[in-house]
Image: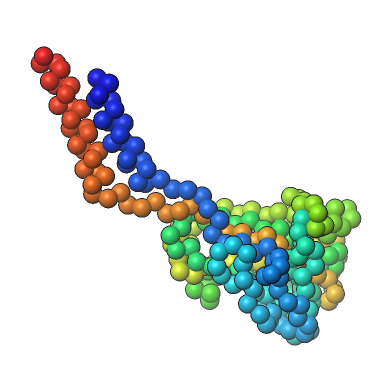
Amino acid sequence: MNKQRSILSAAMLAMALSASASADTVVQWGFESPLTPADATNFAVYPNAIAPSIGSGNASGVHANAATDWTTPVGNGSANSFSSNTWTVGDYYQFQTSTTGFADVMLSWDQTSSSTGPRDFKLAYSTDGTGYTDFGSYSVLVNGTPNTAWTSATYNSAFNFAFDLSAITALDNQANVFFRLTDTSTVSANAGTVATAGTDRVDNFTVSASVAAPIPEADTYALLLAGLGLVGFLARRRRVG
């Protein structure tokens, strides 16, 4: 009987290993040296491609105001983040990557605003960079009193946002996926009105997912069936004997 169990266990283990999936970081933007974006003054659209620190893709920023300044102040527990001023409704940060070979997408990032920077945002996604679907809304905290301001030495999880998009199968195994963090109101982080000098910054934008499970090969199924068949044969032989 022990031999029968060993055969069955081996067959089931082979089946499980062939279909297993594992979590992984697909891409991450930390904005740290040597990939820290260059400061740019008076650009509605940030003029340079922003490469991630892990994986491949491109980050950018788009505003309506041509007088926007793009800077890299201290991050959340790191030296740099990506920041901009002159926020109006519809302005956004965008992150593009590929999920080829991945499924069950999840997002995480840190974000904060100055007291007169924007408070209200929404997360939207796209697979073509043109048509976007809204996923969720959120509000950012003031970078300072009554909160603890960001420093390069200490990470503060109170400023972290995490969204589970694993149910959105349209994002699985795509050559291109896009995510936008878009300003949705004129309300500032201190509950007043957004001012031209008000800023918002983002850091540690991370796309994670599960490695897509491969379809078990025919020989794996054959091994399982053979094992089950042999177990049945030995069981019958044992009863006859």
- The N terminus sits in image quarter: top left
Tell me the colour scheme of the image.
rainbow
Q: Tell me where residue 238 appears, x and y as whole percent.
A: 15, 17
| Residue at 53% across, 53% down | 24
Determine the residue located farthest toward the front in the rendered image.
34
Residue at 28 percent across and 25 percent down: it is 5
- Residue 118: image quadrant is bottom right
**Looking at the image, residue 106 lies above or below residue 40:** above
Residue in the foreground of this view, choosing between 9 and 125:
9
Residue 138: x, y in percent? 69, 58
In-image side of 30 versus 171 (left or right): right
Residue 166 seen by the camera: no
Q: Position of residue 170 (x, y in %)?
A: 45, 62
Number of numbered discs overlaid on the protein picture: 0
* Farthest-out residue, left: 240
In the rendered view, tell whether residue 5 sits above or below residue 130: above
Q: Left or right? Give the position of 102 relative to 197.
A: left
- Which residue is the extreme one toward the top? 241
Q: Residue at x 81, y 54 (%)?
A: 153
Residue appearing at x 63%, y 77% in the figure = 49
Would you say residue 143 is visible in this rendering?
yes
Question: Residue 111 at x, y = what percent?
Answer: 73, 60
User: In terms of depth relative to the viewer, which is nearer, 116 or 98?
Assistant: 98
In the rendered image, the quadrant that contains the C terminus is top left
From the viewer's perspective, tell me whether residue 49 is left or right of residue 187. Answer: left
Q: Relative to 96, does residue 105 appear above or below in the rendering?
A: above
Rendered position, 85 above or below 125 = below
